[in-house]
Image: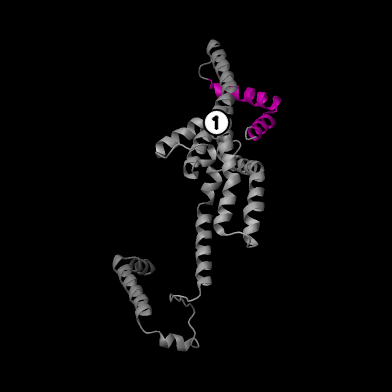
């Protein structure tokens, strides 16, 4: 009896009837007069959305500020990844893990966390200038929004210009078909950002290649020794991994790599 009842409840006919009843109830709630509901709730609705135009321009400016703030927060991850040192650090650490051959050690959370905090450390002088020159004066109503944005872009542009290659910058200027700037300060921000990203990718892969070579040599030596001994069924990674870890620890690898990455942004 219970099985038959559960089958009846799960049948397509029952589900169709249930959905139709739900739609009817929702439609009545939306389109029927709500005076009875308001009276039963003491004359005040639970939720009221006023779409009338406000005569106060200050209220509209606050709404626009909130909208702009939400927009900036939505693109904040892209700003953090693409306009800072995060890209170079994350790529180098990921390639280093693959070169050692530990697969998932350190985990992705550790690599991303280390990259994030190193980014905060490297970008702290830039963010301090943004706070002193743009954010604090704007909060104290000493400068306008446009002036705050221009002052905030100045230290960030200086950081990107130092890390951008002239070749990549010339390529983006040519692709944009804009007039040739007289100096770097005249380069548009929309041109500088992709040029900076290209330079960061190239630098990251160059550093990764230099890190990969010593571990590749160890793999080749171990594979040659195993082949000469006739141990072809034994995976070389099982033998080379302890040697690569020993080399990395004896050379104090984390100290050298982190120090080199931070100093590369000097």
Of residues 75 and 231, the one nearer the viewer is 75
156 displayed left or right of 6:
right
**Quadrant location of the N terminus in the rendered image:** bottom left
- Residue 127's place in the image compared with 229, above or below, is below
Q: Is 31 inside the magenta-drawn segment? A: no
Q: Which residues are magenta?
A: 234-263
**Quadrant location of the C terminus in the rendered image:** top right
Mark 1: give few (<14), some (14-19) or many (20+) Cα within 10 Å.
some
Of residues 125 and 184, the one nearer the viewer is 184
Q: Is 239 inside the magenta-drawn segment? A: yes
Q: How many marks?
A: 1
- Residue 156's place in the image compared with 19, above or below, is above
Residue 128 percent location from the top left of the image:
67, 49
Q: Which residue sits at x=53%, y=63%? A: 65
Residue 36 percent location from the top left of the image:
42, 88
Judging by the rendered image, the residue that carries numbered circle 1 is 203
Q: Residue furthest top?
A: 228
10 displayed left or right of 251:
left
Q: Residue furthest left?
A: 13
**Could you tell me if residue 84 is visible in this image?**
no
């Amino acid at each position: 009896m219970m099985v038959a009842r559960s089958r009846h409840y799960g049948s397509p006919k029952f589900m169709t009837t249930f959905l139709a009843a739900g739609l009817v109830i929702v439609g009545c709630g939306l389109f029927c007069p709500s005076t009875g509901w308001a009276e039963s709730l003491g004359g005040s609705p639970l939720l009221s959305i006023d779409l009338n135009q406000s005569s106060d321009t200050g209220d509209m400016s606050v709404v626009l500020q909130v909208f702009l703030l939400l927009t900036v927060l939505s693109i904040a991850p892209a700003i953090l990844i693409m306009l800072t040192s995060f890209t170079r650090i994350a790529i180098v650490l990921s390639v280093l893990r693959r070169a050692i051959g530990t697969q998932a050690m350190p985990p992705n959370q550790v690599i991303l966390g280390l990259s994030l905090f190193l980014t905060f450390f490297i970008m702290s002088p830039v963010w301090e200038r943004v706070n002193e020159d743009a954010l604090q004066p704007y909060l104290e109503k000493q400068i306008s929004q446009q002036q705050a944005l221009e002052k905030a872009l100045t230290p960030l542009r200086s950081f990107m210009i130092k890390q951008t290659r002239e070749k990549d910058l010339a390529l983006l200027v040519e692709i944009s078909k804009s007039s040739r700037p007289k100096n770097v300060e005249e380069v548009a921000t929309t041109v500088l950002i992709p040029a900076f990203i290209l330079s960061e990718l190239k630098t990251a892969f160059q550093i990764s290649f230099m890190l990969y070579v010593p571990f590749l040599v160890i793999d080749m030596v171990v594979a040659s020794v195993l082949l000469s001994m006739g141990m072809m069924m034994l995976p070389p990674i099982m033998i080379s991994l302890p040697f690569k870890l020993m080399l990395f620890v004896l050379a104090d690898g984390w100290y050298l790599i982190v120090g080199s990455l931070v100093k590369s942004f000097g």
